[in-house]
Amino acid sequence: MIYLRLFAAFAKVGLLGFGGGLAIVRLIYDSIQPFLDMSRETFANIVAISQITPGPLAVNTATYVGFVAAGLAGAASATFGVVLPEFIIMSLVCRMLKQFKDSKWINGAMNGMRPATIGLIGAAAVTLIAPAVAGEGRIGRGLLTKLGCDITQGFAGSFFGMPVDIISLLMLTLTVVLMVRYKKSPIFVLLIMGCMGAVLGV
């Protein structure tokens, strides 16, 4: 039954998705393939939508995939699947941390997990960067193309055989600058970039 399959697939995400958020993007992408034959670009769109809607990335993605695959019952099954293991594990971990907060073993484990989490986020970046800057729906095909600006068609270099869109690359760079240098709110940056994409992509 598809509801049980959805529950099991996202229970795996909830059980093994250490690091949370963007750190488990690759795990989510691999888990949804049996239900939806989804391209990297479509998945990148889902991640973007999940980032601008309330709630954790894993929960939002589970709800979306479950709904597309099997309607409201599928959304409920997938969402419950991803939440249940996290709830159980966090309840146990919180209790254990209070009891063993001075343990060298626990502190060592936490220190070991931190660099691994950065590696997981790096894997997410590898999964998402190609559709972000070289997807089929490149921003450069919109308004500036109509104005005859050839720069929007891409420039030397490619990801997975797709030409890189210079405008998307500039927006990626601007996002990093706004977040790191000017400490802007993520929702502010997403709204600004969404508006820019809407204007340039028409």
Image: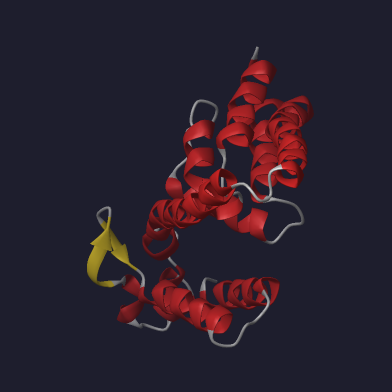
Q: Residue at x 69, y 46 (%)?
A: 60
Give the image quarter of residue 92. Answer: top right
Q: Residue at x 70, y 28 (%)?
A: 81
On the image, the x and y values in percent for residue 109 come to 52, 46
38 left or right of 18 in image? left
Q: Is residue 146 in sight in this rendering? A: no
33 left or right of 130 in image? right
Q: Residue at x 63, y 71 (%)?
A: 190
Q: Using the image, determine if residue 163 lies above or below residue 64.
A: below
Along the line of sight, the residue nearer the viewer: 47 or 87? 87
Along the line of sight, the residue nearer the viewer: 183 or 158? 183
On the image, the x and y values in percent for residue 114 come to 51, 56
Along the line of sight, the residue nearer the viewer: 135 or 99? 99
Along the line of sight, the residue nearer the viewer: 196 or 96? 96
Q: How is the image coloured?
A: secondary structure
Q: Using the image, determine if residue 137 lies above or below residue 167.
A: above
On the image, the x and y values in percent for residue 177 come to 50, 83
Q: Using the image, determine if residue 67 lies above or below residue 176.
A: above
Q: Residue at x 48, y 77 (%)?
A: 171
